[in-house]
Amino acid sequence: MSTDAGRSATDVPTGTDHGPNGSDTASGTASGTSAGTGTVLTFGETMVALRGSGPLKLGGTMNVSIAGAESNVAIGLARLGHSVRWVGAVGDDEAGELVLRTLRAEAVDVSGAWSDPGAPTGLILFEPRLPDVTRVHYYRAGSAGSRLTPDVLDRAFAASVPRILHLTGITPALSPTARAASAHALRLARDHGTLVCLDVNHRARLWTADQASAVLRDWVPYVDLLIASADELPLCLPPDSPPDSPTDTAAQARELLAAGVKEVTVKLGPDGATSYTRPNCSAGPASSTHPAEGASDAHDTGGGSLHQPGAAVRAVDTVGAGDAFVAGYLSALLDGEDVAGRLERAVTTGAFAVASSGDWEGAPTRAELSLLGAPPGTVVR
């Protein structure tokens, strides 16, 4: 979707040149691994991933890859032409080497990452049980990635102030030090004028809803763009919400907007996504939330909200679709797109992820975005 002529630039801090097609560029090598680069900064744990084809107790072969919500977003952004840094720790082991090698190969800047000789790289096992049901098993307690500390974020911001800080609700669940590092990152972002994107990404196997809510509610005043599924929104509602607080998604989103969030985007799976913004205020361009005529399938649902229907694709693997959605949304935001354009790209990148196996492997390049609308059976020659 092209940017409308005369549209206001995004209100994230400047300092990065924009390359062809609106993609952002930064000084450094083409591999995206030189120190100090990164329009987007994200941090968290990336694990080695083993993906089976059936019940684990029956054995069989497994595919080896890597997985981590934040690095999935980083890869998605890098494939779309943006400079992005991932900060985190891996073990001083072969699994850690796989993580760093893969991220470097995907043009993600890992200059702020390190190998921890005192802890192993985390492990995640994927166990498909039904065509649409996959069980996930974590082995990450005490891992290198869980030992993140606040000083790591000090160094990351000192190296280069990012335009966007992306974090998830997974990292604070890993350990008290990782929780402190996440809170410190929010304060650094506020001090430096960096836009904050939070993907709630609740993991019930890591912490309870009450534990998550106690942390995420305190984060809300720092967040510019909040992305969540409908069932995750209550985790972020202000602690002083009345007992009869509204339960419908739109009302909850408006409550979060009233608490200071500029934009709330709700992921609806195959039904697409809806964004809610305060009047004359969004996480990106200052332009209206109303889409340009014929620009996308997004439609105004009233009350400062815009809905983008889902893209029809044959679902292969839904794991990682939410991260791909976030990557598409942030990509369009960096390109200066309005809310309709951001939703359209996010739904598109999410559809690519669903149509492919793996956490991040199906993430599209910028040149591939238009393939989604191709007729069935199309062969690109």
Image (spheres, grey):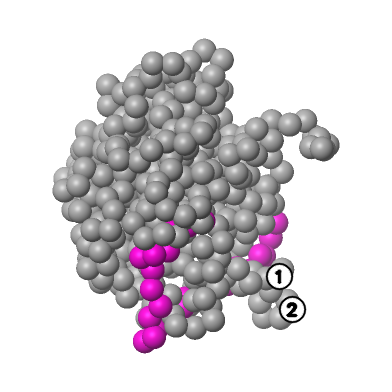
Residue 200 x, y percent position in the rendering: 37, 51
Quadrant for residue 301, please give it: top left
Label 2: element kind: loop
Residue 225 x, y percent position in the rendering: 33, 40
Residue 185 x, y percent position in the rendering: 24, 57
Quadrant for residue 180, please give it: bottom left
Tell me the quadrant of the picture where the N terminus can be found.
Answer: top right
Image point (50%, 49%), residue name: 78
Image point (65%, 32%), residue name: 370
Residue assigned mark 1: 54
Please state the extent of the stretch shown in magenta in the rendering: 107-132
Image point (41%, 67%), residue name: 45
Residue 13 visible to an observer of this rendering: yes
Q: Amino acid at mark 1?
A: Gly
Image point (49%, 20%), residue name: 299
Please tell me the numbered disc located at residue 60. 2
Select label 1 or label 2 by which is in front.
2
Q: Earlier in the sequence, mark 1 or mark 2?
A: 1
| Discs 1, 2 touching: Cβ within 8 Å | yes
Residue 204 visible to an observer of this rendering: no
Tell me the quadrant of the picture where the C terminus can be found.
Answer: top right
Tell me the crowding category of disc 2: few under 14, some 14 to 19, or many 20 or more residues within 10 angstroms, Cα based. few
Q: Is residue 118 magenta?
A: yes
Measured in 3D between alpha carbons, the distance from the residue under mark 1 to the one under mark 2, in whole angstroms, is: 8 Å
